[in-house]
Image: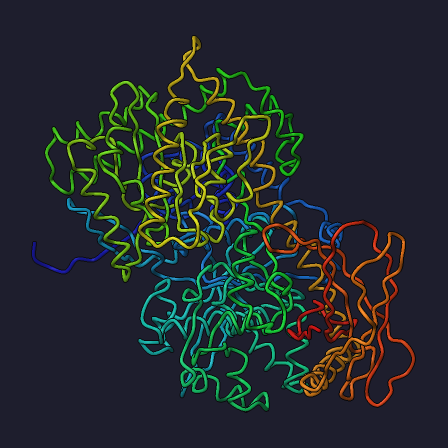
Amino acid sequence: MPGTVYTLEVNPRIPPRLQRLSELANDLWYSWDRPTRALFARLQPTLWLAVGHNPKAFLKRIDQKRLDAAAEDPTFIGSFNRVLSAYDTYLDIAADTATRHGFHSDDIIAYFCAEFGLHESLPIYSGGLGILAGDHCKAASDMGLPFVGVGLLYRQGYFIQTLDADGRQHANYHDTDFGDLPATPVQDEQGREIRVAVDLPGRQVQARVWEVRVGRVHLLLLDTSLPENSEHDRDIAHRLYGGDIQTRLEQEILLGVGGVRALAAVGIAPTVWHINEGHAAFLILERIRQLCLQGLSFPVALEAVAANVVFTTHTPVPAGHDHFSEEAITRHFAQWCADVGATPAQLLALGETVGEREFNMTTLAIRGSRLHNGVSRIHGDVSSHICANLWPQIEPAENPLSYVTNGVHTRTFLATEWFETFDRYLGVGWEERQTDAASWAKVEQIPDTTFWGIRQMLKSQLLHMVRHRVSTQHARNEDSPSRLDRLLRLADPNKPNVLTIGFARRFATYKRGALLFHDLERLAKIIANSERPVLFLFAGKAHPADQPGQELIRRIAQIARLPQFEGHILLLEDYDLHLSRRLVAGVDVWLNNPIYPLEASGTSGMKAAMNGVLNVSILDGWWGEGFDNQNGIPNGWSIKPAPGHLDETRRDDEEANSLYEILENQVIPTYYRVGPAGLSTDWVSMAKRAISSITPHFNVNRMVGEYVHNFYLPAAAQGRRYSAEHFATAHAIADWKARVRAAWPGVALRRVDTPPLRLGFGDSLRLEVMVRLNGLPAEDIVVEAVFARPSSSGKSKKGRHAILLPVGDAEHGEQRYALDLTPEHCGKLEYRLRAYPAHAQLTHRFEMGMMLWL
């Protein structure tokens, strides 16, 4: 048709009686409050699905007649009022909540992350890191913490995935209309949009500050799509993890430097700074710059900044940590060096890693923080080894890198169908007792038939979605109708009695999405039994640049087309939070088989377990802590990692065989061991154990509680201590560290007593060590005896530590340290003597990374 096409969007007017619908649509509280989402869906169900469960977009497109009718519908108004009452009650938290957690009235935690996965209506996330960040914000809101998130507002979040008939992934990017997002530009008192400037070589880039409400907390997001920026600079925050290495560097400068400036621009002065993964570590440089402009020296500013910075690393392999060329860093931070009074060499030293010629963001984050953690017990150990060079004389087991095991937000990922049942059997208010194991033990009281009925209902809902998604894929790829019937023959919502196993996560090679297909002949015998069929559901995206990951998807698609597997393996496209919620609630088994120890934590299995789904997983990440077999009833199944000395082929052989044996001998027989009541009592017992043993320990309330007590409160206290009296402690520590670093190469130990080989029980052991101080006072050095029990494995079992005290005055530059100690137990003992620098104001006693062994 000729002529110009003009577009126009006509928005409805919300009736006065429903005016607060807009308020609900602009608070991501709806992302974990199902009655709020149900309220919107009820107004126009087909539109709710069409806008991807986005309340703000929904209210811009809903038919006016629907709104007018709802305003006159007593039933809808009753539901609306109940939602508003719950919302207002949630927000109406007492002002002293923060102080009840131990914070001061002026404390604020600033949480920086490159992505936040709160809900599919705010597509600024790609995977586990973002979902965890979103859950962290939700828990901070639930707990009433003084908390603000900082990130970037991307027009293109992670891509929309489609799969063609051959299983090839196609990445489709679509620009988001910011007007459809639950985000509002932040304005000053005069009503002007608040903007911040970030310096890049030869230019300034302007960024607009947006605010997203997440219940009781707020999320500040930066956007560079402004007319005063060049086309290149408008694209800096255009796509999540998009562009080349230069764009990645500019995004991280915008996040770290721009994020600090945005907080200042809106009047927020954090007392704790949490860097969630290394992407935001440039905030350390910006905070140092600000203090140096106030008159502090670079070393003093570094100590003052690091005192209240918390850093969490999520990456279990060295190559996964961001790094940039030294030339790029010195070019982008030349003005920083001038402002700080530091040389380029001093700047580069903050990100310098032994054996590398590049600037490492994890190294910067650790050197600019004093509290650091991995995200599971195993990952904490792996990370302490990866980062061991930052504390070169400290054994990895004792260096300052600890761990907080991840958790998940129960109200987001627990299916609605469980809430009423838990109210009845756990007692009203169970949501406030999420970390109480005794409360969750009452799950055992739920009648098996009731429990199984809910599980089958959730599977039926999942299979409805599966049929819809597979049918959509099938129609787009123009496949035959008869093949669609064959594909969906086991995915029948009316017969949800087929064992259904889910595997859904990012398709990276280390996650081994194809391990299940190691021996196709054996697998076919296991799952294609007409008496005990098995349905596998696969979902996940591979990074567009990750060809091996995309090949994994293709291989699964090809295997799914083989006659012996047709209908037993379904590959679902465009894995997102909506599909995730259905999968973790609806499958019977959650499969996870990464290469040990490369699963930092993982959280999808936690979400599944709280819904009564059983995990089959490598003992890696969180499952290394979560799996148990108390009283002979396991809460899932564990695949023991093959010995580390095996090559890749033998390792995969071993672990694939373990997986097949678990499926053959345990999972499938247990599921299909159906009794007179039409269910497997053994299966239900295990599923109840999964809920009662896993949920109280792996929920985000426990996780954030650990951050509060072990990281946030200590960081806030150290920040106050270091900044008090014009940064007196920061000055003292900086001077002390300089003296210690200069003297340490000349410090030496020698033992002057005669070590006995045997003692009678009750006799005293005399230890005497002379320390050449090299100019340091005696109180700057701790001499310590470390006792252990020898073991048959050759590794000593840790025992007690005992400190030797200075005796007399130093003579000829040497100080005597001595201790008389009476062993408490008989048998063989091993002990070693060591010395390290010590100061009462250090955050961690080994933060200097210095230690001498005798």
Image-based side of 376 in relation to 817, left or right:
left
User: Depth check: 190 or 500 in front?
Assistant: 500
Say left or right for 4 vs 807.
left
Q: Nearer the viewer, residue 682 or 248?
A: 682
Task: Give the answer, above or below, for where 745 lies relative to 665.
Answer: below
The extreme top residue here reads 676
The colour mode here is rainbow
Residue drawn at the location 77% of the way across and 60% of the way down? 801
The location of residue 525, given as percent across then percent down, is 25, 28
> Residue 640 vs residue 465: left or right?
right
Residue 447: horizontal and vertical position, in percent?
A: 54, 16
Asked whether residue 840 is in view, the answer is: yes
Q: Residue at x 65, y 49 (%)?
A: 705
Q: Nearer the viewer, residue 769 or 84?
A: 769
Q: Residue at x 34, y 22 (%)?
A: 496
Residue most extreme to the right: 808
The answer to whether residue 199 is above or below residue 524 is below
Residue 204 horizontal/vertical position (percent):
43, 82
Q: Whole-percent x and y of residue 55?
A: 42, 44
